[in-house]
Image (cartoon, grey):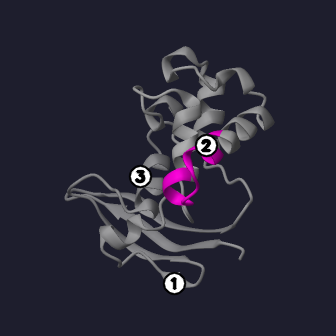
Amino acid sequence: MTISLEVEGLGVAGAAAEIVRDVSLSVEGGRPFTILGETGSGKSLLAQAIMGVLPEGLLTDGRITLNGERIDQLPLAERRAFWGRKLALLPQEPWLALDPSMQSGAQLAEVYRFLLGRSWNRSREEARADLAALGLADADRRWPHQLSGGMAQRVAFAA
């Protein structure tokens, strides 16, 4: 199944002002999508609005659909079911996406173990294979603070 994300007329507003205005975009699953803009232009708020995790006090309008299903009106608990499965966000600071108390390979293995229900041994094997495919075979036993920014971003992407 190809995942598609549609955003139509999305806005983000606080009590005093509209912060993001009338954003529309379409993203095809399996294809990278990058949001570029000046500092303070609302890139992070746009991503947070799509994920459903805006800071308290901010509201959205517009429409967000994932595979034809409207998700912008779903309660957060239901929206969370999409996280890491159909919808993911790779932050600008990749180390914020990684657990500092876990080695890189173990973090990636958790995806296979808990999201896909695989055995721990198979999960570790698949995690090592993914890291190797990203040129990170030696990162398996490294802690997030031991990774460069680019390496951390690739580990977060793999997870």
- The image shows residue 153 at horizontal and vertical percentages of 61, 33
Please tell me the numbered disc located at residue 45.
Answer: 3
Q: Is residue 131 left or right of residue 114?
A: right
Inspect this view and state whether residue 36 appears: no
Tell me, yes or no, whether the highlighted magenta stretch contains residue 78: no
Q: Earlier in the sequence, mark 2 or mark 1?
A: 1
Asked if marks 2 and 1 touch (Cβ < 8 Å), the reply is: no
Q: Residue at x 50, y 48 (%)?
A: 43
- The image shows residue 135 at horizontal and vertical percentages of 78, 28
Q: Is residue 46 left or right of residue 34?
A: left
The amino acid type, in three-letter code, at marker 1 is Glu
Please tell me the numbered disc located at residue 32.
Answer: none
Tell me, yes or no, whether the highlighted magenta stretch contains residue 114: yes
Q: Element type at marker 3? A: helix
Q: Element type at marker 2? A: helix
| Range shown magenta | 113-124
Looking at the figure, which quarter contains the C terminus? top right
Tag in front: 2 or 1? 2
- Compute the Cα span from label 2 to label 1: 36 Å
Seen from the viewer's position, the closer of residues 50 and 12 is 50
Looking at the figure, which quarter contains the N terminus? bottom right
**Tag 2 residue:** 121
The amino acid type, in three-letter code, at marker 3 is Leu
Q: Residue at x 44, y 40 (%)?
A: 40
Seen from the viewer's position, the closer of residues 81 and 54 is 81
